[in-house]
Amino acid sequence: MSAVRRTVPESGKPTTEKVQSIFQVLAPDYDRFNRLSSLGIDRSWRKRAVRLARVSRDSVVLDLAAGTGDLTMELAERGRPASVLATDFVEEMLDVARAKAAGYQGETVIDFAVADAQDLPFEDERFDVVTVGFGVRNLPDRSANFREVYRVLKPGGRYVVLEMSRPPFGPFRSLYHFYLHTVIPTLGGLLTGHRGSFEYLRDSILAFPGQVALAGELHKAGFREVTWRNLTFGIVAVHVAVK
Ligand SMILES: C[S@@+](CC[C@H](N)C(=O)[O-])C[C@H]1O[C@@H](n2cnc3c(N)ncnc32)[C@H](O)[C@@H]1O
């Protein structure tokens, strides 16, 4: 049995070791799986998140759980802030991101750092905007992440959370859940040979709170304005929380 298969959970509850081992193994195939499983729509979700981040030319941006860097690059290419610091706790994912950034010709300074999104090695009030794309649902302790982001944001700074969510319309939700149960593990297994990892990723989507509950958690962490936009009928939501 592979290391990843040994770490397949009974539910979507993440642990640090489990999540790290899954992404270490999936790193080379992660982008291909994303494009195929979402039929390329994932790109438009990240573009929308960048628009909602409202970065300016002087913004100092932190991208958490940046993985292979798709949101980081979208921020640099479309948002064009002064800098984006891409962080993740899996080097193999960041290596793919570094290769993408090597071809970047714009003016945004792109840097990389290994960091746990629940315990950020940055001083207070350093960033204007913090983003996270499809990373929050893998955190064992979301409240620690929200506390840390609140700490490192400047007053008035924005936390943009792009994440899988809960389609509000019941019949569409049933169809989507059928897709999650059938297509995701099968396609993931065929593309990577690690079906168990995709069963975990599916379970983590199903276990993640809906839009209202997530907004409540952000409020509880101290953010004063919390709004969200549903994308693709609520399969995905972008929450924006202002410090
Ligand atoms: C589904 S990928 C998302 C990558 C990228 N943001 C995107 O939009 O495609 C999730 C990433 O979160 C990272 N991650 C999970 N838990 C983390 C943590 N506690 N600290 C830092 N990164 C974490 C994983 O290593 C993985 O690269």
Image (tube, rainbow, N blue to C red):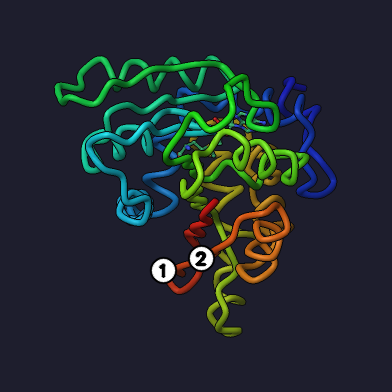
The outermost residue toward the left is 105
Mark yes or no: residue 24 visible.
no
Q: Answer yes or no: do the residues labelled 1 and 2 have beta carbons within 8 Å?
A: yes
Q: How many marks?
A: 2
Q: Position of residue 193 (x, y in %)?
A: 58, 31
Q: Quadrant of residue 16?
A: top right
Q: Secondary structure at mark 1?
A: helix
Q: Is residue 88 above or below residue 79?
A: above
Query: Marks 1 and 2, Cα distance to the nearest angstrom?
Result: 6 Å
Q: Secondary structure at mark 2?
A: loop
Amino acid under label 1?
Thr
**Left or right position of 24 against 47:** right
Which residue is pictured at 44% across the width and 50% down the height? 37
Q: Closer to the camera, 90 or 112?
A: 112
Q: Position of residue 3 (x, y in %)?
A: 74, 20
Q: Is residue 157 above or below residue 59?
A: below
Which residue is pictured at 48% across the width and 40% down the height? 130
Q: Which residue is mark 2?
A: 235
Q: Closer to the camera, 48 or 128?
A: 128
Q: Quadrant of the N terminus?
A: top right
Q: Disc 2, ligand 1: is the CB inside 8 Å?
A: no
Q: Position of residue 162 (x, y in %)?
A: 49, 52
Q: Position of residue 131 (x, y in %)?
A: 47, 42
Which quarter of the frame holds ligand 1?
Answer: top right
Which residue is pictured at 73% across the width and 58% down the height? 220
Amino acid under label 2?
Ile
Q: Which residue is mark 1?
A: 232
Neighbour tally class for label 2: few under 14, some 14-19, many 20 plus, Cα within 10 Å: some
The outermost residue toward the right is 10
